[in-house]
Image (cartoon, rainbow, N blue to C red):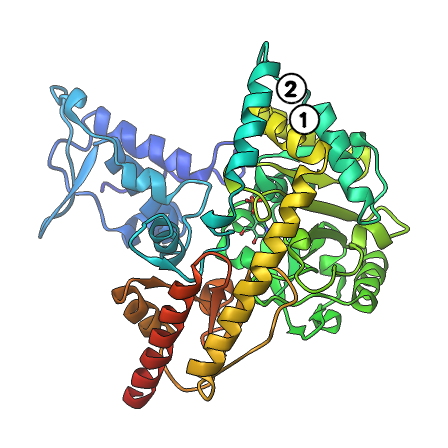
């Protein structure tokens, strides 16, 4: 490259990367760097422009994606442009666009599990859903025929969602001790969207979310994609170990505390009232708002869990997230956020800019389930079945994994969190189980520290599938531990 003194202006409004891109593109189009011209090395360009090498890598990727340059084996990176170049034949470099876009890709293992969970040929021993045998088919078809008679028009809903459904949810929440009007309820497309709206509407790049580790949230990239850090804190048998939160000025603003106080995913732990009170105290003391994810509450087996934090607070520091996914049907995509009206209005505005509201049909269906006793009656059947399935899994674990692993008996929810006590590779166990047609969730997707754990679900597989799979699990662990 001829010696020149051009350098990007670091004070300019246009990013340094954009300036270099435009500069190099002009060199090519003007013919100063003709077809076949060898682009200087990344290091040389970085020195020349006084920027990081990573900036140069991004610029070169972008020039490649437009087809201005190409890498040729043995010759380096060459200009690939002349006035007659036929751009209509050039393909977009999708790979480069995908790699450098805002939203992070999910962990490869999580992507695989999501795919494999849809395949009938696998026994689903990790899946966080009720089994199809618990799908209330006949009541659902009555509900569907009833709503088909009510629909005269399907328009956009109010930004916060179908008002009668919000009222029915507010009424349902009263039974937990949460006293709010429908104006404090926002209907979301599953609780997952609720979490995303919170990240977009109340947090910002550089914010920190504290959460117990392991956690379901570590199996997603939602917060990280918005530039928000997840900060894992220890858990004990009562949930979040609050003394593990590193309180400092740095975190005082714009931080939040996320928790799953009832039947935590993946550990199954339920926080007693005393710990819930401590969470509220810490939240007020350190100016952390609380995201209470309570999607498993209705799945209690032995006794109902303690009141939600949202019901216990005297402040307005808790955002409460719920859903029908775990207790009725995830395909409905009906969830909710409960908070003070100012926050709900803010999140409703973002929701409406994102999708103009959750499907009206799903909202009508959910309303039919909640308005009378259909949902409550359904839950009774769910609890009976979960209790039975939990016993099946626990006794099978005793039979086949007794000296190999330890676990706690959850009082509700869907999961048993199992610590493998012998020295084996969980990744290998996951793959070996797959080759037997059985899908389990390795613990490390919920936190890197959890290399010795697996999460099993007692809700989805049938009794015989559970017994068969746990027997194989025991054999595989034994086999691998002899190898180790
Ligand atoms: C703790 C927790 N929160 C939220 C969700 C998301 O559920 P949905 O968006 O279907 O309501 C899940 C799903 O597994 C979960 O385990």
Q: Is residue 419 above or below residue 75?
A: below
Residue at the extreme right of the image, as rendered: 314
Q: Is residue 209 left or right of residue 276?
A: left
The quadrant where residue 209 appears? bottom right
Which quarter of the image is occupied by the N terminus?
A: top left
Residue at the disc numbered 2:
157
The quadrant where residue 283 appears? bottom right
* Crowd class of label 2 (few under 14; some 14 to 19; many from 20; radius 10 Å): some
Q: Are marks 2 and 1 in contact (CB under 8 Å)?
A: yes
Which quarter of the image is occupied by the C terminus?
A: bottom left
* Crowd class of label 1 (few under 14; some 14 to 19; many from 20; radius 10 Å): many
Residue at the disc numbered 1:
161
Q: Is residue 346 left or right of residue 151?
A: right
Q: Nearer the viewer, residue 103 or 471?
A: 471
Q: Is residue 346 above or below residue 273?
A: above
Q: In this view, does 81 lie above or below 393?
A: above
Q: Is residue 59 left or right of residue 28?
A: right
CA gap, disc 2 and disc 1 = 6 Å
For label 1, being within 8 Å of ligand 1 is answered no
x, y percentage for residue 67?
Answer: 21, 32
Identify the residue at image location x=59%, y=21%.
147
x, y percentage for residue 392?
Answer: 50, 69
């Amino acid at each position: 490259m001829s010696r020149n003194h051009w350098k990007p202006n670091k004070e300019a409004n246009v990013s340094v990367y954009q300036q270099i891109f435009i500069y190099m593109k002009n060199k090519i189009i003007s013919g100063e760097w003709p077809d076949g011209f060898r682009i200087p090395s990344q290091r040389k360009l970085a020195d020349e422009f006084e920027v990081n090498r990573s900036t140069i890598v991004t610029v070169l990727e972008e020039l490649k994606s437009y087809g201005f340059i190409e890498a040729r084996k043995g010759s380096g990176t060459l200009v690939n442009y002349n006035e007659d170049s036929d751009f209509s034949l050039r393909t977009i470099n999708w790979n480069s666009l995908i790699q450098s876009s805002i939203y992070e890709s999910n962990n490869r293992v999580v992507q695989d599990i999501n795919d494999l969970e849809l395949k009938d040929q696998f026994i689903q021993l990790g899946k966080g859903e009720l089994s199809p045998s618990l799908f209330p088919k006949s009541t659902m078809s009555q509900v569907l025929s009833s709503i088909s008679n009510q629909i005269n028009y399907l328009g956009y809903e109010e930004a916060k969602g179908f008002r009668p459904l919000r009222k029915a949810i507010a009424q349902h929440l009263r039974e937990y001790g949460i006293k709010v009007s429908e104006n404090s309820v926002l209907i979301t497309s599953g609780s997952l969207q609720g979490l995303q709206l919170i990240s977009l509407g109340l947090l910002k790049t550089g914010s920190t979310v504290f959460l117990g580790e392991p956690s379901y949230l570590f199996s997603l990239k939602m917060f990280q994609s918005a530039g928000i850090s997840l900060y894992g804190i220890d858990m004990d048998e009562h949930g979040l170990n609050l003394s593990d939160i590193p309180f400092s000025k740095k975190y005082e603003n714009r931080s939040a505390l996320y928790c799953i106080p009832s039947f935590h995913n993946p550990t199954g732990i339920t926080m007693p009232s005393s710990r819930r009170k401590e969470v509220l105290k810490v939240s007020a003391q350190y100016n952390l708002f609380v995201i209470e994810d309570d999607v498993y509450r209705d799945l209690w087996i032995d006794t109902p869990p303690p009141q939600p934090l949202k019901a216990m607070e005297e402040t307005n520091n808790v955002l409460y997230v719920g859903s029908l996914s775990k207790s009725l049907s995830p395909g409905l995509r009906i969830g909710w956020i409960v908070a003070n009206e100012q926050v709900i209005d803010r999140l409703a505005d973002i929701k409406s800019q994102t999708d103009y509201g959750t499907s009206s049909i799903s909202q009508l269906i959910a309303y039919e389930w909640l308005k009378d006793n259909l949902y409550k009656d359904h839950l009774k059947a769910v609890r009976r079945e979960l209790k039975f399935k939990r016993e099946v899994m626990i006794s099978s674990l005793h039979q086949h994994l007794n000296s190999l692993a330890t676990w706690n008996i959850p009082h509700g929810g869907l999961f048993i969190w199992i610590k493998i006590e012998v020295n084996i590779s969980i990744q290998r166990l996951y793959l070996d189980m797959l080759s037997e047609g059985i899908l389990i969730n390795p613990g490390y997707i919920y936190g890197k520290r959890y290399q010795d754990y697996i999460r099993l679900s007692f809700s989805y597989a049938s009794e015989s599938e559970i017994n068969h799979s746990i027997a194989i699990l025991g054999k595989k662990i034994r086999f691998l531990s002899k190898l180790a």
